[in-house]
Image: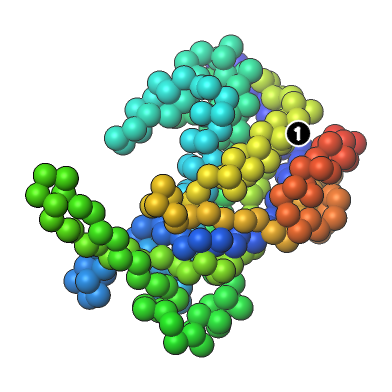
């Protein structure tokens, strides 16, 4: 097999804050059942005990929403569900989703996954506000009681769900998007695919993050958005900011063409 040539040309860094517009539930271990009577607990940082948002939750939700948005075939079983992955190299080369999020290791084709999503901590300011509040049921969180009704017996079945209260802010979130050149890699195509990543964020804002979304939880809003760039020739320098700081996702979308043009000019 001939050697493959792939070179990292640029990295685009997209940072932002995540505000919980409604209560946010991203599940953790069920030890809360024993210590607090909560049926569904949130995931917490082991050192600070603060809730956080795993990068895998953001990345997985964005991929799922984009698959439906792009009408992709659900053909790869993952756990109890299915995701889309391309079956052939020809399909892969034309698929922005698989180029960005990657394909399973058993595929005999593929280039490096473009997207890295970091875990997102609760901001110190939000944590301090919740520490000072006398209205949280557990540290940094509220407990929401839901009641399901048995349709046959009409018996009530109450359950308690732990949520991060509305108004809490997590950040800075960081998405790292790599641009490659070489065999099966086109750096300008990678930069154009950055639009797909932004579409995924818009789909996420319009949907929900975490669990219990159909019952009101998980609506989020992005803010304090910045886009910066590191190039191959100046990688040890501080990232160069592209554009301004955007107060909302709408501002980023409006300036997206300009940001992509600047990134292409730096190749």
Residue 173 visible here: no
What's the residue at 50%, 80% (across, down)? Answer: 130
Q: Residues within 10 Å of mark 1 (few under 14, many from 20)?
A: many
Asked where in the image residue 140 lies, by quadrant, the reply is: bottom left
Q: Which residue is tagged 1?
A: 191
Coloring scheme of the render? rainbow
Q: Could you tell me how many numbered marks the image carries?
A: 1
| Direction from residue 53 to residue 15 in the image, left or right | right
What's the residue at 66%, 20% (across, down)? Answer: 184
Front residue of 230 and 261: 261
| Direction from residue 52 to residue 151 in the image, left or right | left
Q: Position of residue 223 (x, y in %)?
A: 69, 59
What's the residue at 59%, 62% (across, down)? Answer: 19
Location of residue 208 with respect to 23 vertically, above or below:
above
Location of residue 39 with respect to 230 vertically, above or below:
below
Quadrant of the drawing holding the N terminus? top right
Front residue of 37 and 174: 37
| Direction from residue 254 to residue 64 in the image, left or right | left
Location of residue 232 with respect to 163 vertically, above or below:
above
Q: Position of residue 172 (x, y in %)?
A: 64, 63
Q: Position of residue 170 (x, y in %)?
A: 58, 65
Location of residue 74 with respect to 138 vertically, above or below:
above
Q: Position of residue 91 (x, y in %)?
A: 57, 14
Residue 159 visible here: yes
Badge 1 marks a residue whose secondary structure is: helix
Front residue of 101 and 186: 101
What's the residue at 65%, 61% (across, down)? Answer: 17
Asked where in the image residue 190 lies, by quadrant, the reply is: top right
């Amino acid at each position: 097999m001939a050697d493959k040539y792939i070179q990292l040309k640029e990295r685009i860094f997209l940072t932002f804050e995540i505000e919980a517009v409604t209560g946010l539930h991203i599940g953790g271990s069920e030890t809360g059942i024993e210590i607090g009577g909560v049926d569904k607990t949130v995931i917490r940082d082991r050192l600070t005990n603060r809730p956080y948002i795993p990068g895998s939750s953001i990345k997985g939700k964005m991929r799922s929403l984009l698959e439906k948005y792009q009408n992709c075939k659900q053909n790869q079983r993952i756990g109890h569900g299915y995701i889309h992955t391309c079956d052939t190299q020809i399909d892969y080369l034309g698929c922005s989703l698989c180029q960005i999020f990657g394909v399973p290791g058993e595929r005999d084709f593929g280039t490096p996954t473009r997207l890295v999503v970091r875990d997102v901590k609760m901001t110190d300011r939000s944590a301090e506000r919740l520490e000072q509040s006398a209205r949280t049921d557990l540290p940094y969180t509220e407990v929401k009681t839901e009641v399901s009704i048995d349709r046959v017996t009409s018996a009530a079945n109450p359950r308690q769900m732990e949520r991060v209260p509305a108004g809490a802010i997590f950040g800075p979130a960081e998405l790292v998007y790599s641009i490659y050149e070489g065999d099966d890699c086109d750096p300008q195509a990678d930069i154009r695919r950055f639009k797909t990543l932004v579409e995924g964020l818009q789909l996420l804002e319009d949907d929900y993050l975490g669990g219990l979304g159909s019952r009101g939880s998980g609506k989020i809003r992005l803010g304090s958005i910045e886009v910066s760039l590191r190039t191959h020739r100046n990688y040890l320098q501080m990232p160069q900011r592209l554009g301004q700081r955007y107060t909302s996702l709408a501002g980023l979308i409006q300036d997206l063409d300009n940001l992509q043009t600047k990134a292409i000019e730096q190749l």
